[in-house]
Amino acid sequence: MTHSTDTISALKSGPKTEKGVTYCPNCESGTLEAFYEVKSIPVHSVLLMPSRDHALGYPQRDLKLGFCSSCGFISNMVFDPTVHEYSTSCEESQGFSPTFTAFARSLAERWVEEYDLKGKTALEIGCGKGEFLAMMVESGMAKGIGIDPAYIPERLDTPAADKLEFIQDLYDERYTELKADAVCCRHTLEHISPTSAFMRMVSQNIGEQTETVLLFELPDVYRVLKEAAFWDIYYEHCSYFTTGSLARLFRRHGFRPVELDLEYDKQYITIAGYPDGGQPSPLIEGEDDLATVTAEVKRFKEKFQKLRSDWISKVDAFKAEGKRTVVWGGGSKAVSFLTTLGLKDQIDFVVDINPHKHGKFIPGTGHEVRDPETLRVEKPDCVILMNPVYEKEVSEQLAGMGLSPVILPV
Ligand SMILES: [Zn+2]
């Protein structure tokens, strides 16, 4: 959902292949072994298209996930960072959903409280539109510095505006002068292919500040593997972590994890860590997961194939009965769900509560994104819900329109 694929243009380079061996860019010692492949998916799934033609003609690339059995990291082995376009047209913000906003606010409050950050300074790498950084400051921090090429000033409405500073740029070694008590990085690391190089740069920029806390949040791939949640795998995400592989990355770069949690219906990992000063420390809960993750990777392909054929049979059957199916949620999950399954006229259109997405089209399949209000007239028989965490919110909204379609959460 972030853009900070950019952070990465600066760091360019995917997994390095040498004599047929693909080295792991996360531990720089293991090798990646392929276990899941999808051909021709849109290179971007957060940029919606202005017309159906643009959407259908949007650049596509292959995705091939490889697993490193040394560190547990998963990476798109054929990722090409040069295909990404970054600009302020990036519609990555989830800030329009009340559920997501409430989650982000409680996370900001918790982090400020637990890491004693009142009156202190936060730096957010890949801050998007700056909503989260504003919440950190509204929760008591004295100052927030956000850095992101996709930052748009006029979109942020916060009482903390005078304590916020934004830099519309990529974060790299030029920014070592930006000192902070907390370095946040949310939904960004998954866009970075050379994760070890990125963490090395962050660690060097922090330098000797042993009190600085690193606060990261990113998708958990263990759930994706276990549920074969293929809609959570898409081109922008070249790097996939579990709690254990993320903690191991922190430790390799001199950070001692003190928090390793699953949040937001267990979809996201939150991790906090301090510079370890070269001292060893005991493992915390969630770190020791390499064996279980390896087992799930082995089972993934079979689970995915079954799930894919189940979904296709379901939507084909609705179509054959003359029923109308729509998808709720016009974000990356919908793009991946529709393109991975190769769905076309089985789905009428997509709805999303974000008004900035209305009238745009899904790259790859060309489905239109509309205002959920149009469902009053279109009266769908079935709503495929891209994020189960919104089930209550969506069913209430549908009931409020006098509608009672079958709701199928992914
Ligand atoms: Zn590795």
Image: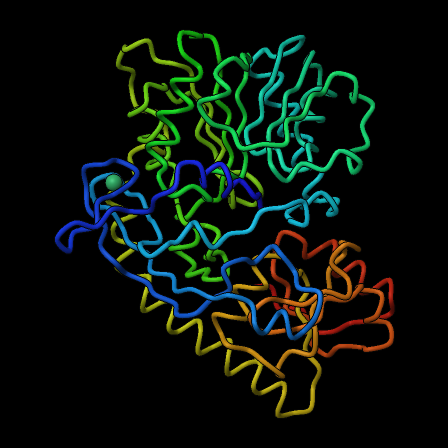
In this rendering, is residue 310 above or below 116? below
Q: Residue at x 63, y 37 (%)?
A: 128
| In this rendering, position of residue 254 left or right of residue 206 | left
Q: Residue at x 74, y 54 (%)?
A: 393
Please tell me which residue lies in front, 366 or 224: 366
| In this rendering, position of residue 33 left or right of residue 267 | left
In this rendering, is residue 20 above or below 257? below
| In this rendering, position of residue 344 left or right of residue 293 | right
Estimate the x, y position of residue 173 in percent, counting from the top left. Answer: 44, 23
Estimate the x, y position of residue 158 in percent, counting from the top left. Answer: 80, 27
In terms of image quadrants, where is residue 402? bottom right
User: Which quadrant, please, contains the C terminus?
Assistant: bottom right
Q: Residue at x 77, y 62 (%)?
A: 358
Estimate the x, y position of residue 212 in percent, counting from the top left. Answer: 48, 12
In this rendering, is residue 317 above or below 72? below
Estimate the x, y position of residue 117 in percent, counting from the top left. Answer: 61, 12
